[in-house]
Image (cartoon, rainbow, N blue to C red):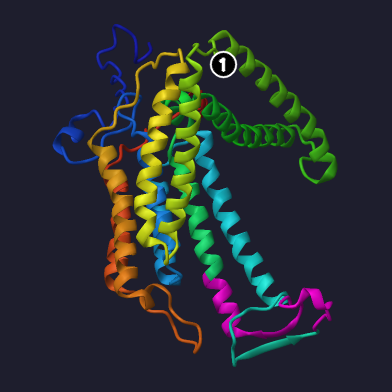
Amino acid sequence: MSSTGAGSPHPAPRPRLARDPGTGPSARRRPLAAPRAHRSNALHPGAWWLWALGLGTAASRTTNPLLLALLIGVAGYVVAARRTSAPWARSYGAFVKLGLAVIGIRLLFAVFLGSPIPGTHLLVTLPEVPLPEWAQGVRIGGRVTVEGLVFALYDGLKLAALLICVGAANALASPARLLKSLPGALYEAGVAVVVAMTFAPHLIADVRRLRAARRLRGRPDKGLRGLAQVGLPVLEGALERSVALAAAMDARGYGRTAEVPAAVRRVTAVLTLGGLVGVCAGTYGLLTADGARYGLPVLLAGVAAALGGLWLGGRRSVRTRYRPDVWGVRAWLVAASGVAVAAVMIRAGSYDPSALAPGVVPLAAPTLPLWPAAGVLLGLLPACVAPAPPLAETPSKEAS
């Protein structure tokens, strides 16, 4: 007789159901712990972008390698703590590799094209290529000094930190939810951007799936032959997905607009273009050390004009918004942490600029300034307050 039968004196124990730690009794015992993310409490993607742009602004104001490494570490820790298994979350590694490539290219340029930094620590002297007179100021080859390489390393690390901060926003913010939050005037442009951003992750997933299938069948998946045999199914799948997406968008009425007066269209164009120019000029002023005085007023004026243009442009949109994302307290905290990091770095650059830009002539080891470093650590706040990703998550559902 089986032990699980009805007449057994010792019935088999009932299996325990898996319980979500974010909804179980343990979560009630920890009221301050971040909840598990689901469809209704997911963080607004705009908060992630504001947080990442704050870290990027801080990275643009310093060449101190210790502060830049701290910024990269903060961004990496938050991504590791709050990244989901969605396809776009895999893009963070590509941005890290791109940052390393930027550093390598910057060092190669410093070696072969020279550096404007004079130095006394000669490393090697390359053969110098003679150039015509019209190319004065350009040098190929010549002296390579340690000071020039260190300056190029600091400069490349700054650009790499900017790229990694943008990559963190790409890995954490859902492009589909970001598209849903865009104003009506930018919806068509947002659709194109989101489709372009999600194309590469789907392509990489198709390549991995096909290579795994070929390995299981004992067929080669590397080399030119394997690449050629994998490339055709990948392109075929991408084409089929594009056709299906176009049909779905057409069925849902994408691209249909309402009629508005010609005067409103002209005012909308002037406000939008003028606002975008003002935002670009103001942002450039804030990112440069000499333009801090006029950067903020121009940026605010540009934002006001752009918002007016977007509000008028939204009158052409006839779509409705289904369950818009809520900008809650946790979104405010995440966005405020990025803004605080940028504000602390800008303030530190005004009263102690030498700490944020260590010199390379003469050579000296960089030091870690205390208050700017403490301000950078404010960027870790999203790892505590943002909703944690679910333990078991289906990437295909996230992608849709």
372 relative to 139 in the view: left or right:
left
Q: SS of the residue at dot 1?
A: loop
Compare residues 67 and 142 and report the one nearer the observer. Answer: 142
Q: Which residues are magenta?
A: 128-154
- Category of crowding for the residue at label 1, using alpha-carbon neighbours closer than 10 angstroms: few (below 14), some (14–19), many (at least 20): few
Q: Which residue is nearer to you in this view: 261 or 145?
A: 261
Residue at 55% x, 76% y is 151
Q: Which residue is mark 1?
A: 255
**Residue for point 72% across, 37% down:** 215
Q: Residue furthest front?
A: 263
* Closest to the observer, 43 or 394: 43
As rendered, which of 38 and 341 lies closer to the eye?
Answer: 341
Vertical side of 211 occupied by 61: above or below: below
Q: Quadrant of residue 55?
A: bottom left
User: In the image, what residue type sits under mark 1?
Assistant: Gly
Q: Residue at x 52, y 29 (%)?
A: 190
Residue 87's x, y, as percent?
A: 53, 34
